[in-house]
Image (tube, rainbow, N blue to C red):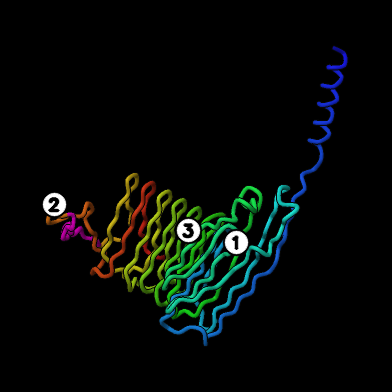
Amino acid sequence: MKKIVLLIMMYLFVQEITAQIPVVSQRKTEDVKIRIPASEFNAQTVFHLKNINGDLNAVGYEGDEILITGTKIVTGKPATIDNFDPDEIYLDRLDGPSTIFIFVQHPGVKVELRGDELHYTSTRNYKKRKWNKNTLEFEFNLQVKIPHYLMADISTINGGEVIVEDFKNGVKASNINGSVYLNRVEGAVTAETVNGNIRVEYDEAPSGKAVFHTVNGNIEVIAPENLSAVVTFKSLHGDLYTDFEQIEYLQNRVKNNSDGNHRWKIERSSPIQFGEGGPEMRLQLLNGNAYIKQRKS
């Protein structure tokens, strides 16, 4: 009996010593610099920057080339000590007929371009290499300068915000777990997220269709006092607020229905005309409120 007790005490002592040994992890940080000269795109090119983890800040400017700078951070947990290879995670590029894609390449996925669409598929060596988010983490915090005349599609997924400013020819900005902020944008504008807020500030009255969509968050649109638009609003658990006074409820829209059983479909929400009417502004939420505010001079 004494021998058994002694063995148990020795085991507990070893466990205590082991618990006090610091956990070793690895981390590598490096700068990101990508330059795309004007000779590699034209005014009809759509530029896509698809991040996964980290912040994105995109600015339209007067220059004639695309400039991407920032930081890559790769952290390996103890299980990756023997095969820690941060160079396997990097920004890659593929070009379609009228598109440029900059995206995150990493083990476990195969990325290919079909026409002007980017597709991700899992690769078979994913499990063999034992690479997964529980042992290896990465993020790219990026700043990008884009000629303001280009259409741009800017997105991230986790751990960051998307900030887009000074685009003259339309922009799409999206996130999954984070907010989206748009400032001084023109043309057709789309902002989407799942868990986060959307804030859009116009210097001039909107000149193109706008679509703003979040699931868990609020939408805030700030526009000049001469705002003229037709707003549609849908929210399961929220309301629309505004300090504009020149508004008018329009008749519900009626559309041709394609389900084969009924000929017409009536929209659930009544469109609201701001000012003299104009481009459509669509606000869609699930859990949150929407605000359309006059910009203070």
Q: Quadrant of residue 245?
A: bottom left
Q: Earlier in the sequence, mark 3 or mark 1?
A: 1
- From the viewer's perspective, tell me whether residue 82 is left or right of residue 291: right
User: Which residue sits at x=29%, y=55%?
Assistant: 233
Camera sees residue 176: yes
- From the viewer's perspective, tell me whether residue 29 is left or right of residue 217: right
Question: Does residue 249 show up magenta in the picture?
Answer: yes
User: Which residue sits at x=23%, y=69%?
Assistant: 276
The residue beneath circle 2 is 261
Q: Nearer the viewer, residue 177 or 86?
A: 86
Res. 242 mark: none
The residue beneath circle 3 is 175
Q: Earlier in the sequence, mark 2 or mark 1?
A: 1
User: Which residue sits at x=48%, y=55%?
Assistant: 176
The correct choice, above or below, for 62 with respect to 158 in the image is below
Q: CA distance from mark 2 to mark 1?
A: 48 Å
- From the viewer's perspective, tell me whether residue 27 is left or right of residue 38: right
The residue beneath circle 1 is 106
Whole-percent x, y for residue 28 in the image:
72, 60
**What is the tally of numbered marks visible in this picture?**
3
Q: Could you tell me which secondary element the residue under label 3 belongs to?
A: loop
Q: Earlier in the sequence, mark 2 or mark 3?
A: 3
Q: Are marks 2 and 3 in contact (CB under 8 Å)?
A: no
Q: Give the magenta-colored segment's residue range.
A: 247-259
Whole-percent x, y for residue 130 in the image:
64, 50
Q: CA distance from mark 3 to mark 1?
A: 20 Å
What amino acid is found at the position of numbered circle 2 in the picture? Asn
Q: Quadrant of the N terminus?
A: top right
Q: Which mark is nearer the camera, 3 or 1?
A: 1
